[in-house]
Amino acid sequence: MNIRLDGRTAVVGGSSTGLGLAIAEGLAEAGANLVLCARTAATLDAAAAGIKEMGVEVLAVPTDLTSVEEIDNLATMALEKFGTIDILVNNAGGPPSGPFDDLPEESWRHAVDLTLMSAVELTRRLLPAMRAQRWGRIINVTSTSVKQPVNGLMLSNSLRSAVVGWAKTLANEVGPDQILINNVCPGHTTTDRLEELAQAASSRQGLSVAEVYASWEQLSPLQRLGKPHELANLVVFLASDMASYINGTTIAVDGGRQQAMT
């Protein structure tokens, strides 16, 4: 199967490192032009320089996805440069870990803006262009916690499930416009975010970081952690014409850890 996205343009959130960068690279390898965004300009520029070497057009826009004004700027610049956007990958860094009693109101409000409202507001601004051309793909990077909550991730468990509910409802609404909306759910995948969670689990459980990683590897029948490009491969497929009848789904990429899918 040779998946090509030549002539398509994608916006990828949180695309300077980790899963977002892997997704952006995968889309570029398939020929898509890219709009990259992340908070830190230096790492974003480095990511953009690498992707440009793949022979596609790249626009890098430093963006705090908790800011409606900066989301406005991102969408405006993307549409001004490329005229339309075909693919939107909603991806943002995960909220802090911690139990309910350790999470004050401001932590909840920030997590709502980062995890849920960033996807809602960016979609709101790019959806009209997709509707006008009657073609679009919106792919939300969530977590396997939407299938089975993860201990210690109160904010992520709550708000990523909200993203899934929003996405399924919107998929029903925009399906007649030939816009497909799906969610992808990475399991334990080797990123800086996973290192943060491993450090937190190490402190909470009294284990070494190496022991935490070993315990996570045993949760998957494959007995290893995932790699960012393994999630990116699914996103590229969902962004293509090959996935033209896949809509409103939530797909885990976790090596088979989730034994009961709901």
Image (cartoon, helix red, strand yellow):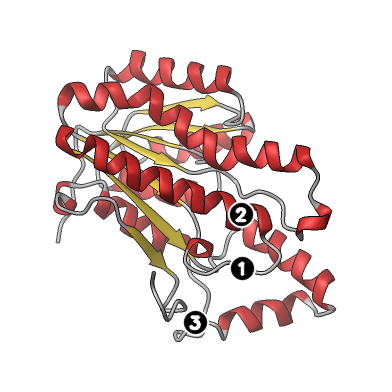
The residue at 51%/32% (across/down) is 37
Q: Is 104 situated left or right of 160 in this image?
A: right
Q: Secondary structure at mark 3?
A: loop
- Find numbered disc 1 in the image and state the secondary structure of the residue it sits on: loop
Q: Earlier in the sequence, mark 1 or mark 3?
A: 1
Where does label 2 land, which residue? 156
Inspect the image, locate mark 2, and give the three-letter code of the amino acid beneath it: Ser
Quarter of the image that includes the N terminus: bottom left
Query: Looking at the picture, how far across and down is residue 93, in whole percent?
Result: 60, 46
**Relative image position of residue 47 (x, y in whole percent):** 51, 39
Residue toward you, 102 or 130: 102
Q: Amino acid at mark 1?
A: Val
Q: Which residue does the image show at 79% across and 50% down from the upper left? A: 103
Which quarter of the rendered picture does the C terminus lie within? bottom left
Q: Earlier in the sequence, mark 1 or mark 2?
A: 1
Q: How many circles with numbers are drawn on the protein?
A: 3
Earlier in the chain: of badge 2 and badge 3, it is 2
Give the alpha-carbon distance from disc 1 to disc 2, as whole Å: 9 Å
Q: CA distance from mark 1 to mark 3?
A: 14 Å
Front-most of 65 and 40? 65
Badge 1: few (under 14), some or many (20 or more) residues near its Cα, within 10 Å?
A: some
Instruction: Indicate whether 90 appears above or below 77.
Output: below
Is label 1 in contact with label 3 (beta carbons under 8 Å)? no
- SS at badge 2: helix
> Which residue in the protein does label 3 denote?
220
For the residues labelled 1 and 2, say whether their Cβ atoms are less than 8 Å apart.
Answer: yes
- Location of residue 166 (image quadrant): top left
The label on residue 150 is 1
